[in-house]
Amino acid sequence: MKTYINPNPENWSELSKRKTFAVADLNETAKGIFTDIQKNGDSAISKYTSLFDGVSISNFEVSEKEIQEAAASISEELKTAIQQAANNIEKFHTSQKETLTKIETTSGVFCWRESRAIETIGIYIPGGTAPLFSTVLMLAIPAQIAGCKNNILCSPPDKNGNINPAILYAAQLTGVTKIYKIGGIQAIAAMTFGTDTIPKVSKIFGPGNQYVTAAKQYAQQLGVAIDMPAGPSELLVIADETSDADFVASDLLSQAEHGADSQVILVATSEKIVEEVNEAIKIQKANLSRVSIVEKALENSRAIVVNSIDEAINFSNYYAPEHLILAFDDAENKLTQIENAGSVFIGNYSCESAGDYASGTNHTLPTNGFAKNYSGVSLDSFVKKITFQKITANGIQNLGKTIELMAEAEQLEAHKNAVSIRLKKLDKTTL
């Protein structure tokens, strides 16, 4: 990682750049594939699956037999780990259920809000260099808690036309309705339009590379909601003399191994800390099987030396990381200063991997600076909020004059009359 010493805030924009492809190229690619799939459906999906995944598939849907075989192939030890993670994720997301509260805003005027599940959702699970079965838990569990009826999952097949067994096991464990062997832009397009095989969904969830992110954003233009723009993974670690360099290095490497387009940032209060972390990275990465991916990610990563923790937090808020680790003592006293981050990990023992897998929080988070205006996935992501109101005769009498005056001022006579006609009838009944 290249090191920058006390950079001027005017240069923060340059230091915050992610590795991206030309947006116009991404959008043009997505648009072309979407148009083809809208016109040609399943045959176009087969074409792109052969082109991008290198396998010819005639039946996209995963059979019950394949799911059973996948479950049988997984060790009991891994099943137990998945179950424990699932339990923690379920606990945390169940706690997000709203308690219905009716408010009497004016005497006789009652207002409240209720949640209703999105009926059909699409879940996209990357399967390329790392089959993210943990993401199945993160998306299907809150969907199940919310009460979504149709939970559709798409994931790219391997060269043998199969989906990773752990993905299938996690899907059946969490109540996924249908599973399809489709990846990339074509999967997002299929769920956007629906085909003879793939159901049309109302909202699409899940991370992916920049092509998948571009596809999700294009789907949004066509009337399908998305969770957020979730692209290549990223991590920012803030460290000082109380940090453990070995821990910091391990966290940076854990995110760098996601993909060559991942980005990790170290913001430290001295050059000595950066040197110690870099030395630990050299030692640890030598033992990683994905070292070539890690090294490519590190080329696009950087270390920044600042004068204080407060300055480090200011840079972090500017960068708006997907994951933020406060790897220093007394970090809890700095939490009120954190404004922009997808998920925050506090102290030397709160490794980001815990959030990726099993602590209970959701790991589907905004990237590329979108933490400035998006939240990570939660139970709310799978429901719509509907407001209700009930106005009694007494209520309309108490509020009616206010409504009439406001409607008249906006020159909307029919709005005023909807109140006036009620008030007149009530006046007659009280005579």
Image (spheres, rainbow, N blue to C red):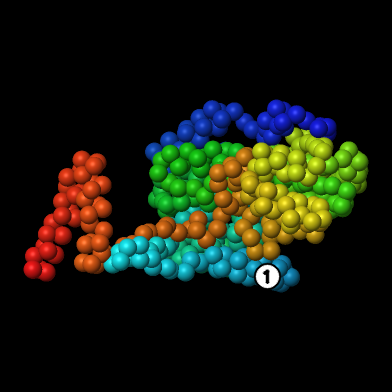
Q: Which residue is mark 1?
A: 84
Q: Is residue 356 left or right of residue 242?
A: left
Tell me which residue sits at (73%, 52%) in the image.
334
Say what secondary structure mark 1 lies in: helix
Q: Judge by depth and name the residue closer to the eye, 305 or 123.
A: 305
Residue 180 in view (yes/no): no
- What residue type is disc 1 on? Gln
Using the image as rendered, state which of residue 142 and residue 33 is in the foreground.
Answer: 142
Q: Residues within 10 Å of mark 1 (few under 14, many from 20)?
A: some
Q: At 85% across and 51% down in the image, what residue appears?
A: 243
Write the residue at 69% across / 53% down: 335
The answer to whether 226 is drawn above or below residue 398 in the figure is above
Please provide percent x and percent y for residue 156.
Answer: 59, 49
Q: Nearer the viewer, residue 159 or 423?
A: 423
Q: Is residue 5 above or below residue 110?
A: above
Q: Residue at x 64, y 60 (%)?
A: 361
In-image side of 16 versus 430 (left or right): right
Q: Identify which residue, 105 or 360, lies in the foreground.
A: 105
Residue 289: x and y in percent read 81, 49
Indicate the quadrant containing the C terminus: top left, top right, bottom left or bottom right: bottom left
